[in-house]
Image (spheres, rainbow, N blue to C red):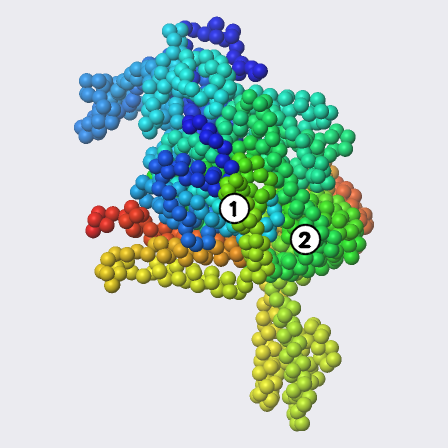
Amino acid sequence: MMAIPSRTPARRRRKATDMPDLLLELFSEEIPARMQTRAAADLKKLVTDGLVEAGLTYASAGAFATPRRLCLTVEGLTGESPTVTEERKGPRADAPEKALEGFLRATGLTREDLEIRDDKKGQTWFAQFTRPGRKAEAIIAELIPAVIRNFPWPKSMRWGAGSLRWVRPLHSILCILTDENGASVVPFDVDGIASGDTTRGHRFMGPEAFSVTSFDDYAGKLKRAHVVLSAEDRAATIWNDATNAAFAAGLEVVEDKGLLAEVAGLVEWPVVLMGEIGAEFMELPPEVLQTSMREHQKFFSVKHPKTGRIERFITVANRETADHGATILAGNSKVLTARLSDAKFFWENDLRVAKTNMSRWTQALENVTFHRKLGTQAARIDRIAALARELAPVVGADADEAEQAARIAKADLNSEMVYEFPELQGLMGRYYAQAAGFGEAVAKAAEEHYSPLGPTDDVPTSPVSVAVALADKLDTLTGFWAIDEKPTGSKDPFALRRAALGVIRLVLGNGLRLGITSIVEARALVALGALETVDELKRLAALVRAKTEALNEKGEFGRSLLSVLPKQDVADAKALEQSVNILRGTLEGLSKADSDVRQALEDMFAIKTRLDTIRAKSKDLTDDLLAFLHDRLKVHLRDQNIRHDIIDACLAMPANDDLTLLVKRAEALSAFFATSDGENLVQGYKRAANILAQAEEKDGVEYRFGADAKFAETEEERALFAALERANATVTPALEQDDFSAAMTALADLRAPIDAFFDTVQVNAENEILRRNRLNLLHEITAACGKIADLSRLEG
Amino acid sequence: MAKTQSKPRSFQEIILALQTYWARQGCAMLQPYDMEVGAGTFHPATTLRSLGTAPWAAAYVQPSRRPTDGRYGENPNRLQHYYQYQVLIKPSPPDLQALYLGSLEAIGIDMETHDIRFVEDDWESPTLGAWGLGWEVWCDGMEVSQFTYFQQVGGHDCAPVSGELTYGLERLAMYILGVDHVMEMPFNDPDAPIPLSYGDVFRQTEEEHSRYNFDIANTDALLKHFEDAEAECQAILAAPAEDPKTGKRIIMAHPAYDQAIKASHLFNLLDARGVISVTERQAYIGRVRALTRACADAFVQTEAGGFDLEGAQ
């Protein structure tokens, strides 16, 4: 049925007779499927590296894994390591006796073994060592136990009363060397497990122990004992038999490489069985069928090629039976039916809830805390909905739809299906939103608003999805920033780096033009309690006003209070805060005030201070979050081969919270600097900036007053004035259109006039007026260039 | 391996077959623990006895409660109250897999026609501060047991290592008996004068408990009970080792552990009521783990936990 792992007969014939083959098998309880391939590779590397390090060479090596064994074959091994002679230098001949004694101790030699020879530093003791070659057998007997003890399993364990660690209990070790005289066991012992020349076959179909004499003998006997040694062979058999079975029924297997590799690691003797899925489950979404079968049962899905409906399953058993798998298939079908009954039960229950507008799920979100410091899921949804509405016009979505989508996007988290299969979150949201009668854009947003989840995940482009996805991520970022739960080092428990990258990719992928700062700052103010604080201020102002108005004798202080406090419009927070500032200046009047009023005013001052602190914190928070986004953006752009200094030059520009503009600028700059025009622009800028900086430093002033062409003396000077005027005439409108390359091309034309200017004109003229005018001219040049990016940040 | 006996015909016959089999392998046949637990592992015969160096071999049935799995007795295989069969042997014998397969034969699973597989399933109990490596055992694609080599319990490394086997009895029995709905499974011999199905015994209790767990359980009271159990557990462990009345060294690891079990179950109930958020969950689990850890710390100071009083003096 299956090929024995191949080896080239030609090599075997060429092999020298004193070149033995090594066969090693580590036989254990079942090794997790996901670890087998790596373990085989590790075994090969560790052993062959060890052999080579010990001075042996080999012709070829191969490693294999099954659920119960790791196997390594090394062919054409040298029989022993070569004898090595080496020399070690000791102390000088005239060194103190103690030094020589120390050298003898360290080398284990006597004085007779040493000789004195001339060295650069004079007469010196030398020791000659001869390390005799060692038999391959001895080297292996030492190497293998060390490899076993230090094996890099992702997770290992102890068992019984022993201290050895292996992935699961290790039962036996087969280790033989085979040459033309036959096979011999390489003797060693690892925690009571002695090496030998025996192994066992399939747990049920070939459990008896047998001894082997070579790799060929081993592989052949294993096959007869119902073990296919090579994982590739097992996978190939499974895929081949599965596609044949499906084809014969006019169906096709849904490809799943991960599952294939896993299943190949679960069996030593794969037997493919195909079964039917009950008609009652055909109404379930195909993703549900597939997920349930894959995750719970490790079944392949078999679909109808035309309709895409999943109609059958394929399971892979680990044995043949007298009834040709009938019992096994019946059992598997039964388990699947129970699983799918569960899924159907969830689906039907969920649909009932969905059809009542999902209100039970959305209400339930009120009882679920999102984060202790960030309130309930319902409160979070409110925030996301408000933000999605606000973002709707920017992304081109309908505001009502965006809000609606945000309100139901996470409803499926309370569905039974998602409780059972968390990986279906979003997808079920879409099905249920459709069932609830929401529009396609809203339903789609339920599925897409989690995206993008990683750097390669698709970015949603439907406007409603984009609005909700962006609102969700911005709310998460602002919220966790507000409670100071930022990612640190490798710790990012709330996946905030992913959220930040999500924001970046959503904005860039859709070319969105929005200033993140104002959005974040508004949210930060709310998150830090600005609204409550303002409300408290309003309440106190109204109280002060009412109390003061009620006084018979208002006095001068009372009258001034009333004149300062806003009247009807206490609701106007800005006016109110101004009046608090004014009132603060009249503190001396406080002593004359009514005690209630005085208390209220003092409270107002305290609250105003708190409000100011919140404002400052919000500002800091926003700056910090923007810096975080910029860091993620830098990583993102570096992956697109944009130089870091170009990114820095663009980040230093205003409106750097408009990420689309920022990247547009950086990309234009990057492309431009690859051309000679770009080089011209930078050189022109640098020359002007250097002279200007030197003069400013020397004079201790900044030349920012604007140059006047009428003071121009030479032709070159006038030409530069004219060129600058021409350039500016192009640059300003170009930048208004965000046409960076037009602006840069215009500025690059300054290079020649600048060079001519510097070649002929003495900037530091005797005449102070001329000198100042020229320096101011240089400033205008750097300022014009500075409209593109902060070119001073460029390297080289 | 012992040859297949006559096929069992009822739920209880399967339990009895397991009892007989493991008794024959030398296990002490214990009885269920008399408290509400989420799994057989919580029985002190497993949790506490897997600690320390003293050899141990025990098997027992443990009624287990998972409030979130309640389905009002309607779901064919989900129950909020079900039975686990639990075996714990320390140190784990080298032939534990073979012993286990023998137990499957003993309850009527023929290795020649069925497909038995050991599929990676690392076990971790955050509330017990415990983990181990092993498998879920599949019979024809159905998980019939958990097979675990304990590596750590209550924050203590297990040395020697215990081997733990857990059988989900209802599911296993339904499979062997060929029953599609748990409530239709014969509980006693179908030919008995009064044949009882699983549903006769448990349908109504499932319904009652489902309603209670999901909608009625007073969450404020549960929260209070949780705090009380936590405080009691801590208070018990804070008592000095020497009992002033008897003058003996009596560390009360077991009474304290009872309170930890209680806290754990109350947490499960609160979880079923949906009042614990994802983030709060971690905090509650952490609190229960702190209790079980403290109990484990106390147990290893006792004789059964391998504490050598003579040596310590």
Q: Is residue A515 left or right of residue A398?
A: left
Horizontal side of residue B49 vs B275, given as left or right: left
Residue type at tag 1: Ile
Helix, strand or loop at label 2? It is: helix
Please tell me which residue lies in front, A751 or A456: A456
Residue visible at 36% across and 21% down in the picture = A195
Residue at x 47% of width, y 24% of height? A203
User: Element at badge 1?
Assistant: loop
Expressed as whole percent of the image width and height from the top left, the position of residue B262 reads 44, 57
Q: State the quadrant of the C terminus of chain A.
A: top right
| Disc 1 versus disc 2: nearer the observer | 1
Mark 1, Cα crowd under 10 Å, few <14 / some 14-19 / many 20+, is few
Q: Residues within 10 Å of mark 2 (few under 14, many from 20)?
A: many
What's the distance in space between the residues labelled 1 and 2, CA to CA? 49 Å
- Res. A443 in view: yes
Left or right: B180 as drawn, with respect to A49: right
Residue at 64 percent across and 52 percent down: it is A414
Seen in the picture, residue A618 relative to B68 is either above or below; the reply is below
The chain holding disc 1 is B
Please check whether the numbered discs 1 and 2 fall on a single chain: no
Q: What amino acid is found at the position of numbered circle 2 in the picture? A: Ala
Mark 2 — residue?
Answer: A411
Q: Position of residue A561 (x, y in %)?
A: 66, 85
Residue at horizontal 40 percent and vertical 35 percent from the top: B21
Residue that numbered label 1 is attached to: B194
Image mark 2: chain? A
Indicate the quadrant containing the N terminus of chain A: top left, top right, bottom left or bottom right. top right
